[in-house]
Image (tube, grey):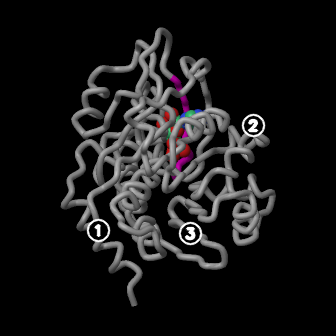
């Protein structure tokens, strides 16, 4: 393991509204880039690119800065912060989007500060695929480009998304979305179709069932950690991605072992995220807790 290379992350920084049968929060700080950055910051330096409005709380900016997240690329502009509202069912596995208000995101054009352009690890969080490409146009020679997306873009901007995928090494996406993207209910066939679109590595997030790593014909399965206290799954996917990319940025070589370790680190981080609303649990998380859950993951499926 070597010193971590900085990770460049672009995505939404949001004020969410979350409803579960067991509690709700409105507003609560969220967003794909926020969850990703807090999670990846446990592994090494992170450089965030995003936009917030005047209503974004100062404590959250300070919290990110305290976690070594470089905020030179975070624009604060007049208007309201991106807002997403969702409601979960009684098992906390199904959710409906009640509201997506782009707000300041509508006119957002990512500007990558000069100091970020040599980033070797780039995470394109869940935003308009055209904006994801504009980030890639501004970085010089990344070693690994990792992207996320969601049904909102698969349905609403498919052609643009397909363009972006041609330039992506790793796609991290959930099971329902990979089916939708590939137009195939079978995950193995869907993975082949995604490979053909560009990404040579595909990580399929399966919520409480864990994650699958596809590299061509090679598949690695990681289970999810059995938890007795699941509170809010929002952001688990981005938190997973933060652990995954953060872990890879510490590796001298991105080989099969490194990718498998990264999937487990992603699973570890995702498992913490769901134990609190929004960022609540991640804000209290410690390095020893991460190490101990990583060891517990190893025991979980060893035989
Ligand atoms: P996840 O639960 O991993 O899918 O991530 C949820 C986070 O993604 C929330 O904090 C939202 O603010 C953010 N989000 C939801 N929809 C979108 C969208 N269309 N574009 C960008 N970010 C979004």
Residue carrying label 3: 212
In the rendered image, the vertical position of residue 82 relative to residue 302, given as above or below: above
Residue numbers of the magenta segment: 82-91
The span from disc 3 to disc 1 (Cα, nearest Å) is 23 Å
Q: Nearer the viewer, residue 10 or 226?
A: 10
Q: Can you give x and y, in whole percent of width and height, for residue 271 in the image?
A: 39, 58
Instruction: Report which quarter residue 186 is drawn in.
Output: bottom right
Residue 183 on image: x %, y %: 81, 57
Label 2 or label 1, whichever lies nearer to me, is 1
Residue at mark 2 to residue at mark 1: CA–CA distance = 39 Å
- Residue under circle 1? 1
Q: Nearer the viewer, residue 148 or 166?
A: 166
* 3 or 1: tag closer to the N-terminus: 1
State the image coordinates of residue 58 (x, y, percent, origin top left).
29, 20
Helix, strand or loop for disc 2: loop
Which residue is found at the position 74% from the left and 53% from the top?
Answer: 181
Q: Which mark is residue 157?
A: 2
Horizontal and vertical percent for residue 61?
Answer: 31, 26
Q: Is residue 159 above or below residue 107?
A: below
Which quarter of the frame holds ligand 1? top right
Whether residue 182 sits left or right of residue 274 in the image: it is right
């Amino acid at each position: 393991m070597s010193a971590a290379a900085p990770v460049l992350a672009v995505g939404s920084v949001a004020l969410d509204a979350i409803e579960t049968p067991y509690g709700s929060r409105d507003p609560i700080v969220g967003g794909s880039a926020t969850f990703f950055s807090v999670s990846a910051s446990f592994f090494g330096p992170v450089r965030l690119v995003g936009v917030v409005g005047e209503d974004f709380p100062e404590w959250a900016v300070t919290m990110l800065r305290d976690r070594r997240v470089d905020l030179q690329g975070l624009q604060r502009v007049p208007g309201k912060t991106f807002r997403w509202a969702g409601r979960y069912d009684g098992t906390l596995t199904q959710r409906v989007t009640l509201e997506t208000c782009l707000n300041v995101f509508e006119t957002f054009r990512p500007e990558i500060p000069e100091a970020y352009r040599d980033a070797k690890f780039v995470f394109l969080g869940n935003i308009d695929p055209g904006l994801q490409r504009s980030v890639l146009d501004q970085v010089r020679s990344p070693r690994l480009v990792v992207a996320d997306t969601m049904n909102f873009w698969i349905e609403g901007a498919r052609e643009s998304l397909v363009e972006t995928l041609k330039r992506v090494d790793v796609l991290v996406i959930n099971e329902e979305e990979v089916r939708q993207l590939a137009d195939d209910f079978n995950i193995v066939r869907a993975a082949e179709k995604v490979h053909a679109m560009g990404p040579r590595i595909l990580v399929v997030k399966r919520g409480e069932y864990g994650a699958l790593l596809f590299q061509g014909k090679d598949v690695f399965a990681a289970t999810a950690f059995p938890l007795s206290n699941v509170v809010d799954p929002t952001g688990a996917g981005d938190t997973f991605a933060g652990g995954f990319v953060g872990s890879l940025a510490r590796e001298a070589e991105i080989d099969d072992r490194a990718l498998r370790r990264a999937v487990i680190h992603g699973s570890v981080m995702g498992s913490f995220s769901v134990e609190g609303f929004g960022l609540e649990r991640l804000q209290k998380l410690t390095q020893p807790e991460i190490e101990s859950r990583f060891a517990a993951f190893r025991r979980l499926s060893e035989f």
